[in-house]
């Protein structure tokens, strides 16, 4: 991830690196790359939600004939709302960000580093989340 990119661009790159949430629920093998879908449920006509409110969907589930922008068959089969897909995407992106931080700690400190130290850095000694998405973005750049 290149330096100088905005936080939204960084987040969208992470979204495109996680697996399709719809394929995960349906147990399908993802055959096309993941793209970011901007949910339209609950927003006005001809509008879309912001970049931080995106869903990780493969081309088939996103723009394919049975996808969200098609006849929505895959969405109905998964029995998920677009906002449930968004929540699943956020969880996957957060896990990916933690893995990135752990990998960078391993590369920097070698095999002697401890996962607990990395998690303590992320969550604090009391394990309460205190790192914001902006902080993770700064670490990953």
Image: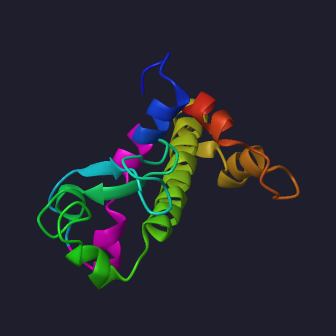
Magenta span main SS: helix
Magenta residues, start to end: 13-28
| Front in this rendered view, residue 61 or 138 | 61
- Magenta stretch encompasses residue 25: yes
| Front in this rendered view, residue 1 or 46 | 46
Q: Is residue 141 visible?
A: no
Q: Residue furthest right?
A: 126
What residue lies at 51% left-to-right and 43% top-to-bottom?
100
Q: Is residue 10 left or right of residue 121?
A: left
For the N terminus, which image quadrant?
A: top left
Q: Position of residue 53 (x, y in %)?
A: 50, 51
Q: Is residue 27 left or right of residue 39?
A: left
* Quarter holding residue 77: bottom left
Is residue 52 depicted above or below 1 in this figure? below
Q: Position of residue 42 (x, y in %)?
A: 50, 61
| Front in this rendered view, residue 57 or 110 | 57
Image mark count: 0
- Magenta stretch encompasses residue 137: no
């Amino acid at each position: 991830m290149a330096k100088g990119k905005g936080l939204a661009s960084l987040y969208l790159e992470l979204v495109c690196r996680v697996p399709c949430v719809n394929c995960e629920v349906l147990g399908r093998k993802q055959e096309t790359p993941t793209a970011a879908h901007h949910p339209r449920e609950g927003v006005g006509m001809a509008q879309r939600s912001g970049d931080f409110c995106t869903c990780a969907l493969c081309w088939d589930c996103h723009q394919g004939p049975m996808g969200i922008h098609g006849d929505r068959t895959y969405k109905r089969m998964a029995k998920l709302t677009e906002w449930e897909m968004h929540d699943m995407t956020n969880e996957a992106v957060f896990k990916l960000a933690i893995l990135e931080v752990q990998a960078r700690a391993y590369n920097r400190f070698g095999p002697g580093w401890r996962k607990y130290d990395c998690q303590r850095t992320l969550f604090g000694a009391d394990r309460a989340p205190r790192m914001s998405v902006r902080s993770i973005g700064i670490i990953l750049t």
